[in-house]
Structures are given as C-alpha cells and as structure tokens.
Amino acid sequence: EAVLEIKSTGKPQFNQQALGQLNEWIGRGKLNRGKIYRGIFIGNSSIELPPEQREKPFSDSWVKSAKLIPITALTGVTLFEAYQRYKNRMLDVAEFWSAIFSTDGVLTSKMF
C-alpha cells in the first residue's frame, strides 16, 4: 500500500517542503494504523516550460531526503511514458509496480 502526493511548481526544482505532507502521511500510517506505507511523489517542475526544456526537478538534497524517508519520486513525464508503453502493450505492469515499490529516490523510465 502507498500514499500518493502529486505536486507541480513553476520553480526549476522542488524544495524540501514538498516532501513534508507525504512524510506526514507516512508517519500517520505508522502511528494510527501500524502500517508502513510507501510514499510515492509525482512532480512536475518548471510547469511553464515544455517538458524537454525542464531541468532536473529534484535537487541532490531532495533526493537524499527521499531515499532516507523512503519515497519513490517520479516526474509526470516518466508517468506519461509508462502510460504510453502500457497503451502500446509494451509495459510489463508487474515490473513497473515492482520498481515503484522498491525504488528509494527517483524512478526513471529506464528502471522498468
């Protein structure tokens, strides 16, 4: 099971605060339900720019925090690439979900 956060920003990168709510939900799951949920963060930065012009949305410190929590982060572009592969019957769905639940930090389409 997982908790999901979807965010966008006009800034080139997400700041540490972007992890706050998701980390809180993970903590509540442990405290209130005795469950450890996988955090999944889907983010789009520099939303005014076309995807091919966007820089790295997650700073090194952000990725380090995501790995420590642990959270799987991916961009909307990565999710869209997975959807396109699924639609074209080229996505191994089990492999995709395995990558989501086993990646601490940033997931790229090369990982599934």
Image (tube, rainbow, N blue to C red):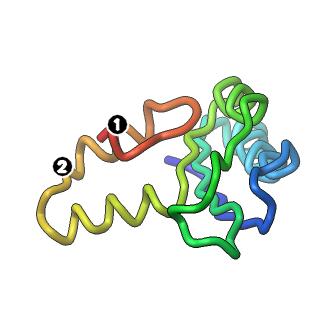
Taking 23 as reference, is 82 above or below it?
Answer: below
Residue closer to the observer: 29 or 97:
97
Give the residue at mark 2. Answer: 92
Taking 94 as reference, is 86 above or below it?
Answer: below
Percent coordinates x, y for residue 91 in the rendering: 19, 54
Residue 69 falls left or right of residue 99: right
Q: Residue furthest left?
A: 89
Instruction: Give the CA separation, mark 1 to mark 2.
Output: 11 Å
Taking 45 as reference, is 109 above or below it?
Answer: above
Q: Which of the 4 image quadrants contains residue 69?
A: top right
Q: Which mark is residue 22?
A: none
Which one is in front in this view, the residue at disc 1 or the one at disc 2?
Answer: 1
**Residue at coordinates 14% horizontally, 57% vertically from top-left?**
90
Specify few, some or many for label 1: CA neighbours under 10 Å numbering under 14, 14-19, or 20 or more. few
Q: Secondary structure at mark 2?
A: loop
Specify few, some or many for label 2: CA neighbours under 10 Å numbering under 14, 14-19, or 20 or more. few
Q: Residue furthest front?
A: 53
Residue type pointed to by label 1: Met
**Residue at coordinates 73% horizontally, 37% vertically from top-left?**
59
Residue 50 falls left or right of residue 46: left
Residue type pointed to by label 2: Asp
Residue 75 falls left or right of residue 46: left
Percent coordinates x, y for residue 65 in the rendering: 75, 30
**Residue at coordinates 47% horizontally, 62% vertically from top-left?**
77
Percent coordinates x, y for residue 12 in the rendering: 75, 55
Earlier sequence position, callout 1 versus callout 2: 2
Q: Quadrant of the C terminus?
A: top left
Q: Which mark is residue 111?
A: 1
